[in-house]
Structures are given as structure tokens and as C-alpha cells.
Image (cartoon, grey):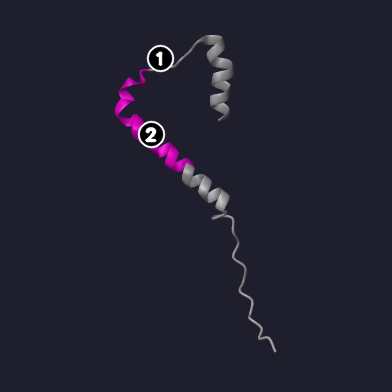
Amino acid sequence: MAAVGLYTIVIWPLTFWDLANLGLEALGPWIGLIITATFAGGTLGGLCYFSGLFSKRKLPARPVRAIR
């Protein structure tokens, strides 16, 4: 997000560089896959991060005490 912000706030207004001369037309058939993979990866990463999937520590099981 920082790179996109830097590009849209600083580079585009000052240079009018709009990526038109990079020859990205050759990637046309891959654009759908790239966008889908980016969205899916971000969704999966966010799910794992916010659910705490990788940061949960498993506590040792405590014995159950009988109530008398």
C-alpha cells in the first residue's frame, strides 16, 4: 500500500508516468490470474493473521478435578 500511495501521490502528478510504455500488453492473458491470486493470497493471509492461526500457543491440558 505504501508503494501505491507513493506512486499516486508523488510520481504520477510530478512525472505523468502512467506505466504505458512498459509493454504490459504481453501479460494480458495472465492479468485475471494475477488479480485472482493476489486477492486470494491477501484474503488467506488476513484470515490467518486475524484468526491467530499461526500465533496460538497450545497450552498443556490440565487434569479435570471432580467436584465433591
First to last magenta residue range: 23-42
Image coordinates for residue 48, horizontal then vertical, percent: 52, 50
> Of label 2 and label 1, which has the lower sequence position?
1
Mark 1 Cα-neighbour bin, 10 Å: few <14, some 14–19, many ≥20: few
Q: Amino acid at mark 2?
A: Ile
Write down the quadrant of residue 53 in the picture: bottom right
Image coordinates for residue 49, horizontal then vertical, percent: 56, 49
**SS at circle 2:** helix
Tell me which residue sits at (53%, 10%) in the image. 15
Residue position for label 1: 20
Identify the main secondary structure in magenta: helix
Q: Amino acid at mark 1?
A: Ala
Tell me which residue sits at (43%, 37%) in the image. 38
Instruction: Say which mark, if any, is on residue 8.
Output: none
**SS at circle 1:** loop
Write down the quadrant of residue 58 in the picture: bottom right
Instruction: Say which mark, if any, is on residue 34.
Output: 2
| Position above or below: 31 against 59 | above
Q: Are marks 2 and 1 in contact (CB under 8 Å)?
A: no
Q: Quadrant of the N terminus?
A: top right
| Position above or below: 50 against 4 | below
Image coordinates for residue 5, horizontal then vertical, percent: 57, 24
Tell me which residue sits at (53%, 25%) in the image. 4
